[in-house]
Amino acid sequence: MNKEKKMNKSIIVTGGAGFIGSHVVRLLVNKYPDYNIINLDKLTYAGNLENLRDVESMPNYVFEKADITDEARIRSIFEKYSPDGVIHLAAESHVDRSISNPLEFVRTNVLGTVILLNAARDYWKDDYDRHRFYHVSTDEVYGSLGETGLFTEDTPYDPRSPYSASKAASDHFVRAYGNTYGMDVVISNCSNNYGSHQFPEKLIPLFILNIKEKRPLPVYGDGRQTRDWLWVNDHARAIDLIYHRGKSGETYNVGGFNEWQNIDLIRSLCRIMDEKLGREEGESEKLLTYVKDRAGHDRRYAIDASKIKEELGWTPSITFEEGLEKTVDWYLENEAWLNNVTSGEYQNYYQQQYENR
Ligand code: NAD
Ligand code: DAU
């Protein structure tokens, strides 16, 4: 039987094989057995179907390997599934990679988003009210804060890296399609996520891996940059809420109410890892190595998430301490996953990124 036909709602989740996307797909597939969840992903270095082993045989889940910049293919996927909505997460997401290869970020994040928007605009043209395009974006579009202040939904855009510039551009296109064509669009801008299944190029999983393997921990600059950390499962809960109950045309900031300077977070991680690995206290901190700063490094991000809290009743479900411990446990228990994703291309990336710092 053609399973996409019997379900009562179809949602395309782009980037569903990535870090956040896989948590969103898992949540939706389990929570809504009568929905058809279509995971549309190109499977770049960051996309991994192993992330979804536990849901791949569920009757309400399908996978389509596709590139969001392939217009004909995207249009054919709309025809095939008649989606009621799109939750768009597919993107190039790593700031360091955007510094060495900005064009790839323009191609995927800007062009890819516009191609998706065009397909949605044309396929849904007779009834925009019953179809939603939701773009999952980042707090980095707002720029960099000083010692005080928070990003609100009204903070003017001031992107400062090729990555954040590409996300800002895609946000602008999404809003423009809402205004120009009357599409139902919604955007959320979230702070730094952490949790299971994150590719070990980002701070927390990279440092867990390096501590485990007793490799240097490359702290950029003075290590005093500040980020607001949110457990990825809580971001997935927010995305579910915003998709279903967020107001058309609105923006929602999502954050953990949880600011940390990098060096303090890294020291906590070292302590947890020493304990879990049965190492002497202070052993992992010896791996700290200050290296050349990231070009244009944003100093501080901090999110005011009161709108989603007040309007949709969302708050983070666990503390950072609990989340970090769960995350460390997951990486230590999933050595095979870590070995698979760090073979091949990862080695080249790591060498290029860190060898001359
Ligand atoms: P990720 O890099 O882990 O995953 C990205 C996914 O997109 C991968 O599965 C990849 O294969 C897929 N993809 C990339 N290019 C594609 C293309 N051309 N066509 C189809 N699929 C493609 O990213 P993530 O950390 O899970 O982030 C997901 C989204 O959330 C991104 O849009 C990112 O900007 C945003 N975001 C991330 C964070 C964070 O802390 N990680 C915070 C806020 C917002
Ligand atoms: O704020 C949301 C954003 O958070 C998302 O939009 C991005 O997709 C996501 O990658 C993340 O961006 P950051 O640049 O903040 O995350 P990253 O994990 O790369 O770095 C976190 C901080 O740690 C940042 O200040 C840089 C620093 N860092 C990072 C790495 C990889 C180091 O000091 N050393 C490192 O090796």
Image: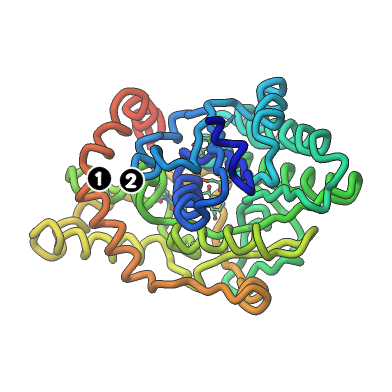
Residue sitting nearer the eye, 4 or 297 = 4
Asked if residue 175 is positioned above or below residue 15 in the image, the reply reads below
Q: Are marks 1 and 2 in contact (CB under 8 Å)?
A: yes
Q: Is residue 288 left or right of residue 298?
A: left
Q: CA distance from mark 1 to mark 2?
A: 6 Å
Disc 2 target residue: 206
Residue at the spot 12% in from the left edge and 56% down from the top edge: 277
The spot of residue 218 in percent (x, y) is 33, 46
Residue at the spot 28% in from the left edge and 31% down from the top edge: 340
Q: How many marks?
A: 2
Q: Is mark 1 within 8 Å of ligand 2?
A: no
Question: Neighbour class for label 2 at 10 Å: few (<14), some, many (≥20)?
Answer: some
Q: Is residue 108 in sight in this rendering?
A: yes
The spot of residue 336 in percent (x, y) is 22, 37
Quarter where residue 343 is shown: top left
Q: Amino acid at mark 1?
A: Asn
